[in-house]
Image (cartoon, helix red, strand yellow):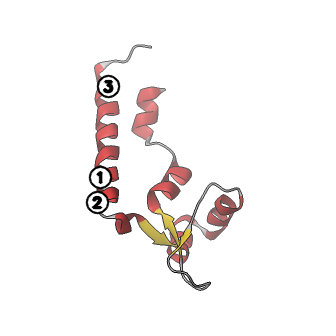
Amino acid sequence: MEIDAWQLKTIIRETAKEAVEEYIRRSNPTSDEITYSKACRRYGEGWLDHQIAIGAAKWIRKGVYQNSPKIFSIKQLDDLKYGPSSQLRAAMG
């Protein structure tokens, strides 16, 4: 498989973007958190409930009590909803 300079540039740019986003998540983990109600507004309740039912979307409880909020990862939900970036898909395919 040969790639041209534009594809290589796109792959490097998208990889660097992912690395920076991962660094931000690691240095400030709360920036990647979203509650169930906000995730329902952002992604749709039906879609989110389906992802939970099939085991694709994982959540943790922010606290020890039953009414403590469910917390999801924005990165994980974005990956499930949108997949890899369109530029990266175009460069790879």
User: Which residue does the image show at 37% across and 18% down from the upper left?
Assistant: 3
Q: State whether residue 31 is above or below residue 25.
A: below
Q: Image quadrant of residue 45?
A: bottom right
Q: Image quadrant of residue 40?
A: bottom right
Q: Do labels 2 and 1 touch, CB within 8 Å?
A: yes
Secondary structure under the numbered disc 3 in the rendered image: helix
The label shown at residue 8 is 3
Question: Label 2 amino acid?
Answer: Ser
Q: Position of residue 34 (x, y in %)?
A: 46, 70
Q: CA distance from mark 1 to mark 3?
A: 22 Å
The residue pinned by badge 1 equals 23
Nearer to me, 8 or 87? 8
Nearer to me, 44 or 78? 78
Mark positioned earlier in the residue sequence (1 or 3): 3
Q: State whether residue 65 is above or below residue 60.
A: below
The residue pinned by badge 2 equals 27
Q: State whether residue 43 is above or below residue 1.
A: below
Q: State whether residue 3 is above or below residue 78.
A: above
User: Which residue does the image show at 43% across and 68% down from the upper left?
Assistant: 33
Question: Label 1 amino acid?
Answer: Tyr
Q: CA distance from mark 3 to mark 2?
A: 28 Å
